Structure formats: C-alpha cells, structure tokens
Amino acid sequence: MSQAVIREIDDSRRSQCAIMFTDILGFTSLMHQDEQRTIQKMESHRNQLEILHEKYGGEIIQYYGDGSLSVFNHAIDAIHCAMAIQQNVVRLNLPLKIGIHKGDIVRKGSAVYGDGINVASRIESIGVAHSILFSEAIWEDIRHEGLETQSLGSLHFKNVDKPIKVRALVMDGLTVPDKNALEGKLENRQGRQYRAILMGTVLVFLLAIAGMWRYNMYLNSLLDDDITTMGVMPFRFEGVKSLDASFQSGLLENLVTYLSSFHGMQVLSSHSTEGYANSTEKPTEIGEELSVSHLLYGTLRQGPDDSIRINMELVDVRNGRNIWAKSYNRKPEDLFSDPVDISSDLADFLEARENPYRLEGATESTRMSPTTFRLIAEAREEAERHTAESFALSNDLLNLAIAKDSSLALGYALLSQNYSQMHAYGFLETQEAQDLAEQNGGIALYMDRNMAEGYASNALMQYTFYEAEPQEILDLLQEAVLLRPSYDYAYHLMGQVHYDLGEFEMAKNYFQLALKLNPDNFSNLRMMAKTTLALGDRRLANKLFGKLAGKYPELTDTKLALVDYYFSKRDFDRVEKVMEDIMDPLRKEQIRLRLAVEQDDLTLAGELAKRITTEYPNRDPGLPLLLYYDKAGNTQKSWEILDRALANKATWLKELKNVDLRIKEADPDRFSELLEDVGLVHEPA
C-alpha cells in the first residue's frame, strides 16, 4: 500500500487530498440471504481494494462496517481507482456506491480528521448502487481528462455550512442517481441517518465477528454527528433524604441499561462516571476525560405530597451547551421503576433507533426492585475479586436475590458466569462447574431471550468448557451486542476469544471498545495490557500494567499479571519481588519453577516439579510444569500433562497457541488435534 499519501502530515499540519468513501447497499439483506457467500465476496472485495489502492497510489485509512475510507494525492488517481473498483464489484454482484471529495485533512496517529472527510462521507451517502459521485472540487481537477459527467446540482448536506455541487460519473456499468429523488445525509431529509447509524454500529459487529474487519476507535471522530457517545452522570439529590447510596446507584444503572439498548448511541457503564458524583469540573472537562460527546445529568427533588421530581438535562460537551431538558414526577414507590419514558424521550431527541433485534413476544424477566438491585450489585462486586471466598459470597447473594424474585433472569445469568469462572480459577471440579453453569445459563435464556447477559453467560460457559467452536461462541456474543450495543463484557469476551487464537489486532480492537465503555474494569485493563504486550507495544503495555497495579494492588490476579509482564522483560528480580506477595503456595511454587526454567536451571526445576506434583496431587500443575518437561525434552511427560489438562478442561490450555513449545514441532499433527479440541482453530462463518 502506498505510503506517499499524507506521509508528512503531523499533529499541526494540514494537507489537501482526494478523499474516497465506499459503501455497499443492502448488506444486511445480503447476509440474511446467503451469509457464507456474502462473506466470501467481501473477502474478495477487500483484497481487490488493497490491490487497486496500491496500483493507483491511494492509502486505505480504515475499514468500517462494509465500507472504507481512503485518500489519494491526486483527484484523477482517485477517480481511476473508483472506476476499477466498480468494475470489480460487478463481477462480485455487490451493490457498491462511492463518494469522492477534495479537501483538507489532519493526521493524528492512526486517526484522520477534517471537514473534507465529513463532506466526502455525505456525498457517498446520496449515491445508489454502482454510482461514483464527486464534488465540484474534484471536477475542477479532472475536467480536462475527457470523462463524461452529469450534474446533480448544489446540495445542502447535514452539518455542512455551504451547499456542495455534486456530479456523477457517466460510463457503461455505472448508474446516475435521479436528482429529484436523492436520499442520504441531506439537511432537509429527516431520519435518514438511521441507515448510517446502523452501518456504523450493527454491521461493524457482524463483520468483526466474522473475523474480517478491524475496529478503529477513531470512528466516532469521523462520524461524530451520527454516533452519540454518552456518559450518564450520578444523580444529584436535593431534599431527598430517604435514599441510600445503593438505591441511588440502582437508579443510575437502570437508566444506563435502558439507554445502552438503543442503536446509534454508545453509553458508558455506570462505573465509568460514578467517580464524578461530587465533581465540580465543567462538562467540557469531564467529557474530554471520558471521551464522550454528551453527558446526561439528573436531579431528584422532593416535591409536594411526597412526590419526587426528576429533572434531566443533556449537555453537548463539545460546546458546553444544554441541548435537551425534561422533568418527570414519580411517587416514591415508583421511583425505581423502568425509566422507559426518560430513555425513549432522550433517544427520540437524539434520533437513535429502537433496538430492531429484540424478539417480539419473547418472555422477559421483571425489573429489579431496590432490594434486589443491592443484592445484584454486591454479588457483582464480590465476583470481581476472583477468590474462592468472594465467588461463594457472590453466589449466596445471587441465590438470595432469586429467592426474592424467582423470575430474575439476570440472577441466573450471573450465577452461570460465576460457575464458569470458578472452574477457570480452579475452585470447582470440572463436571460440577459445567453442569451448574449450563443449568443456570439455560434458565436465564429461557426466562428472558432479550437479555444480553443470557447470551454472554452461555458464550462464557461454552468457551470455558470447550463446548463450541470459536465462531459459535462469537455468534452468541453477537446476539448480546445486538441486543445491547454498549455491553462491555460481551466485547471483552470477543477480545478474549481472538486473543487466545493469536489474533491480537482483532483482540485489541475489542478490548479498546470494552475499555471505552468501562475504563476502569479490572478484566478489561488486564487483557488490554496483555494484548498490547503481545503486539510489541511495550510503552503502552507498561502504562497499562502500571494502571492495573495502581488501581487493584491487592488482587492476586494483578500480581500474576505483573509476574507475566516481568517474565516477558526477563526482569527476574521483580518477578521474585512480586511473587513474595502472593499468598497461594502453589502459585508461588509454579512461579519458582518457571523462574528456574527461564534461567536454564533444570536441576532446580526438576526438584520443584517433583515437589509440586507430590504436594499438590489434586490441583492442576499448570503451564510451568509443561514448560519444564518440554524444555527438558521429556515428550512423554509433556503429553501426560496436556492430556490431563484436556480431561479437566484446564483454562490455561487456551494459552497454547501463544506459547513456544518443542512438542509442537515434534508431533505437529497431534498438537493440531489438541488445539482443535481446546477450541483454538478458528473457521469464520
């Protein structure tokens, strides 16, 4: 791919380029008609895009959904490339449209900004299948090239100050839109942004799950007028003294849950904003810290006759203006009810889309009461500590919540997640853990087929116990994110699957999205740190591991993550220092064994290996014992450990694809079969 384009642009410099957007019409319908064939076509199309851009001196900046953004130094190169692209998609029978504009851009890292991008996107939006549209600025550069064109007139696009003259290229195989029936991102067309929203969110999920497209976290910067990123601030209470902290948190969580089900909005988790409860910072400052475009504020005031008045305000943090406000009255006993009216009113104002993926007529669980919410919140908090005691307490709290409300599907989903994780951490025998995880996950989906947690818990169960192929797990997680586009845990699990498969770039994109929605979550931070390390970005990895250690210094998982990090740096002194702070004696012995192996002290390693197998016969010896026997050349022992781990469905086997082992070369066929058994062979649908 050409690197000449905008090579010299930095944070403070601008450059004029020809900017091209491509987009495929009706992609959802194509996927529904023949998903496998459509994916094959898209793979071929993407390969041709790469080849043609290299041929005509262009650079693909990013893929988004089923489209692309690219730039060229010269307008005529962009036109010739567009013509070649359209000729190629005719062969593939893909209804592609292309929009091109010449304008200023600014490059910051992997992101590209500029009004020119906005205009090019809007020109593309009014195209039809097999069309190439471009602005007058492009026409001025190519008018002497002998190309036939047709004017579509001067058009007023949304969020573009001046009208733009648009032309269509005329040639065999191309279609010219009817100038009297144009649709797209036009200023006088209402509701057409729904399509752009859907292309920019839902189709990204579909294609990323198929393992084809890369997320780019700067997408919102390019389409910031189509995608709303929002933080819901903690409620302020004025004169309302009867509500405790957990009740207040429940109000916030309920509202976030409802808002996050809309398509076209990206809503941060309630944990992301809870630290701003008493903040005096300006909305513009908070918005910059959270990387959101809008903040939603709520105030509860004591009204007459014991009623409570809820005042809601939406602030656009880009200019600090209050752009929407509305008040609601509630009786105290109804205060915790579903915030449907608030969510719907706000979504209508933002022109977000009601979730089209909810199953009509499906049984849905009742919403939580304040008491149930407290139990659920405490259960989640305990489960995040990842100890045997905390999981046991979490399960007790969830069972108590279910006892109070037998239709609480969320309680069963979280129980399923806990049992899967208890096995992963070695706190519960394989068969018992699997039975309990499967049973509770099944109940959750039976009770509420529109609950994202139900699909995520079943995906986790199948992932943990090797019950499905990677693509089947990703399909379940796809259901979760379609039901709730702002569900960070589903993105986390997607990232985990791709990480284990060695698909680190894809994993990074999912973890980035999970972190954006829930920035301080331990699991998101840890896996993002591990992924950046795997990609060789030690500078960012060091920053993330440092943040992990600063926020969660007491968690054993933090210490184990730091041990892995220091091993990667071969900083054995720090490994030993962190190891001494780990309480689990088996974990310490495993780290000592790995230290001996890494330092080629196989005599000491042999003594430690013997001690581990003797003193802990009923616990999984873990990866360090395999590393020792593999390095010692003991193939038989290595396979004994692997076979035992496979029988017990040990979670550490998921790491095998990313570990250098001699037995991979010694018996590649057997090792390939093992990877397939563990679920480390990815065949996208």
Image (spheres, rainbow, N blue to C red):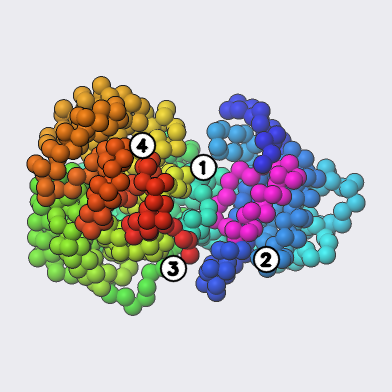
Q: Are marks 1 and 2 in contact (CB under 8 Å)?
A: no
**Separation of marks 2 and 3 at Cα, in angstroms:** 29 Å
- Would you name the residue on which mark 3 appears? 356
Which one is closest to the eye, mark 3 or mark 1?
1
Q: Which residue type carries mark 2?
A: Leu
Question: Crowding near pointer 3: few (<14 within 10 Å), some, many (20+)?
Answer: few
Most extreme residue toward the top is: 573
- Which residue is depicted at the point 49% across and 55% down? 211
User: Which numbered disc, 4 or 1, marks the residue closer to the eye?
Assistant: 4
Give the label on residue 92, or none.
2
Residue drawn where x is 68% and y is 59% of the image:
97
Name the one closer to the observer, 259 or 1. 1
Residue 670 percent across, percent down from the top left: 37, 56
Q: Quick one: label 3 or label 1, which is nearer the N terminus?
A: 1
- Real-space Cα separation, disc 4 to disc 1, in angstroms: 20 Å
Residue 423 visible at all: yes
Left or right of 152: which side holds 529?
Answer: left
Kind of residue sitting beneath label 4: Ala
In the picture, the quarter occupied by the N terminus is top right
Give the mark toward the camera: 4 or 3: 4
| Camera-nearest label, 2 or 3 | 2
Residue occupied by mark 4: 529
Residue at image mark 1: 218
Q: Is 457 on the left-hand or right-hand side of 402?
A: right
Q: Secondary structure at mark 3?
A: loop
Amino acid of disc 3 = Pro
Magenta segment boundaries in residue numbering: 42-66
Q: Is residue 227 magenta?
A: no
Please say if 578 is above or below 45: above
